[in-house]
Image: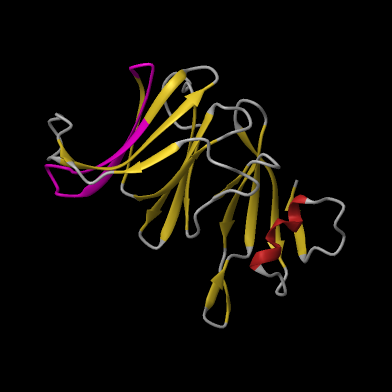
Amino acid sequence: MRRNASVLCLLVLVSSICSVGQDHTRPTSTIASLRFDSDKAGACFATVTGFYVQATGEPRQRLTIACEGKQLAQFETPGAFIEWAFHRLDGNRLFVSWERGTGGELTVFKIPPNAPAKPIFDKWETYVPEGLWEPDVILVYTGTRFFGPVKTPTKPDVYVWNGNEYKLDSSWNWSTNMRWQDRFCILDAKLLNCPATVTHH
């Protein structure tokens, strides 16, 4: 999910059964728990639980964020938890990636969350959006091309963090010879031989 990043947290995977005590759900399982220290909110815990919607039987997952014993936010998704990381550079953003069917979702929360407590970034695409810390951007990939059996995207959008939110900065089309391992060349303005063409800036 990230490059040049180290996660300053303790990740504990749990398999215990619990109950969330909400009318519209059936009993849930705790999938993952994370403890982290926020510069602005103090000691925090994030928890992902799985549950079934009582009316439909649909499986969903819920992210709960609490700091200093106070619940700050909840977020529900039909996706399945993949991984998370707390931004080590500004100390106030939590990145969570989810698998959704044949695609993926990236959700970013500011800590403490803005009011109302909603994600500052949440996108689902065929490919899980990729959050980087240096530079401070998110790459959202669309389009599809096959190199033999390997499927790769063809059109990345670059969202840049401006201190308060992620704003779309540029969109690109990759040339047919772009390799996945070279995808970050679009972030280096000095690299003249990057096999991509900007379509929006």
Q: Is residue 181 above or below residue 42?
A: below
**Percent coordinates x, y for residue 106 in the rendering:** 48, 45
Q: Nearer the viewer, residue 46 or 54?
A: 46
Q: Is residue 50 magenta?
A: yes
Q: Is residue 163 above or below residue 55?
A: above
Q: Is residue 60 magenta?
A: yes
Q: Nearer the viewer, residue 86 or 172?
A: 86
**Percent coordinates x, y for residue 64 in the rendering:** 33, 31
At a point 33% along the width and 17% down the height, the residue shown is: 69
**Percent coordinates x, y for residue 115 in the rendering:** 44, 18
Left or right side of 91 for 68 = left
Quadrant of the frame with the C terminus: top right
Left or right side of 3 for 51 = left
Q: Nearer the viewer, residue 160 or 201?
A: 160
Q: Which residue is the extreme one toward the bottom?
A: 148
- Magenta range is 46-70
Main SS of the magenta part reads strand
Colour style of the rendered protein structure: secondary structure
**Percent coordinates x, y for residue 173 in the rendering:** 70, 62
Q: Nearer the viewer, residue 185 or 141?
A: 185
At a point 14% along the width and 29% down the height, the residue shown is: 21
At a point 41% along the width and 24% down the height, the residue shown is: 44
At a point 56% along the width and 69% down the height, the residue shown is: 144
Number of dots carrying numbers: 0
Q: Quadrant of residue 191?
A: bottom right
